Amino acid sequence: MNRQLSPTTDRQRYVVLDALRGLALLGICLANFPEFGLWTFLDADSQAAMPTAAADGVVRFLQYVVVDAKFYGIFSMLFGIGFSIILSHAQERGSSGIALFYRRMGVLLLIAVAHLLLLWSGDILVLYALTGMLLPLLCRLSDRMLVGIAVGCIALPVGLDCWQEMGGFRLSAAVEAAWWRCAGTYGIDEGNFATWLRDCHSYVGVHQFLMQGAVERLYEFVDGHRLLKVLGLFLMGYVMGRNRLYARLPDRRRQLCRVCGWGLAVGLPTSVLYAVSATQSHRWGLTVHSLLYTVSALPMSLAYMAGFALLWLRWQRGVVFRALAQPGRMALSNYIGQSCMGILIYYGIGMGMGLTQGLWQIECTAVGVFLLQVAVSALWMRRFRYGPLEWVWRMLTYGRRLPLTKRAAT
């Protein structure tokens, strides 16, 4: 007889995964806040005219080297690991876990669409929820087959970009045109795009920007072949999780050293070249830029994960790992919380600081926001079992009310 399916308990959690998820949240905050600060929307001449331009140029280059695509890669692989854990726990209770996972993805999609249309058009969760629904279709394949599909998904965008460059066309052209038509219906154009959110002092204007931003996000997904990349990363994470690599870290020390070493040896120099390409308008062409992205992002993400695991094995009781684990336990709440903080700080309906800070100042603000989330998460998790959005997500997934406070659960 099937036992009732329930969320993961505290005893079933692996703190190293929570801490790694917390690290990924920091990287995502650093990657996203330049857009909240509206600096990303400025043209090159406007960026160069800012008094912080010299420092910003250094920070921008380093961001491409150590941040861009690396932490989103970690977050994506952790998603795949999470899928394996859901299936494992369901099978322990005599269920396949597939129906549960689809319910979980359905609820995540609802939350993601609300985030996309009401808060921030840079949302990644819609893509995660939709791509995640493909995982059950592939989960019975062998590890070798899954790794092969993952590598193919990650490499295929390079071929597609080569095809586009050689053919002189863009697969995303129609979506881009639809985006600017949608923007035009609200009076948004290239002239006021960067200043729109700063100058809006009512949510009506912000929502207009979000409506065209949703179409822009679709354009970015198509132009960047995001579904293929995310599916590949999900599958790699699923293979890691299915083999429970996170549960046997002491036995994998030598392999972790090799992954970290090779990942840095391959990923660091190619990340430098990728940063040169990104900051100089793809000087070697789209195909080379796409190739540099591919051969830099994944090796660096794997190196970060392996290096983090090695440090964890040595200092797992350290304050840094315990601090990172707190926001990692409520990653959904903190991810959307970062959007709320970005709006509050930079948009005209908030403090209106958009376009008043250079890139290096925005990144300092992002670090401050993350440190605040660490503190708030630690206080929250002392009393509660889940983050606020995680609680809602679980209740809608399992179809019953779950105790939120730790006292109510005992």
Image (cartoon, rainbow, N blue to C red):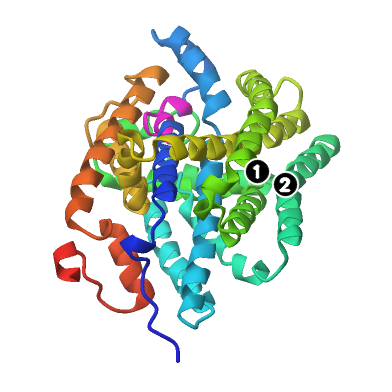
Residue drawn at (27%, 40%), measured in percent from left and top? 373
Which comes before the other along the chain, label 2 or label 1? 2
Residue drawn at (51%, 20%), measured in percent from left and top? 60
- Look at the numbered disc 1 and give the secondary structure of its residue: helix
- Report which residue position mark 2 lands on: 171
The outermost residue toward the right is 166
Q: Is residue 99 above or below residue 192?
A: below
Depth order, front residue of 81/365: 81
- Report which residue position mark 1 lands on: 223
Residue 39, magenta (yes or no): yes
Q: Is residue 380 above or below residue 56?
A: below
- Look at the numbered disc 2 and give the secondary structure of its residue: loop
Indicate the position of residue 38 as horizontal and vertical percent values: 40, 29
Which image quadrant: the C terminus? bottom left
Q: Is residue 181 visible?
A: no
Residue drawn at (46%, 71%), measured in percent from left and top? 89
Depth order, front residue of 50/135: 135
Q: Amino acid at mark 1?
A: Asp
Residue range highlighted in magenta: 32-40
Q: Amino acid at mark 2?
A: Leu
Q: Is residue 80 visible?
A: yes
**Is 333 on the left or on the right of 267, as rendered?**
left
Do the CB atoms of the residues marked 2 and 1 lie less than 8 Å apart? yes
Mark 1 neighbour density, 10 Å: few (under 14) some (14–19) many (20 or more): some
Residue 117, magenta (yes or no): no
Depth order, front residue of 271/208: 271
The outermost residue toward the front is 251
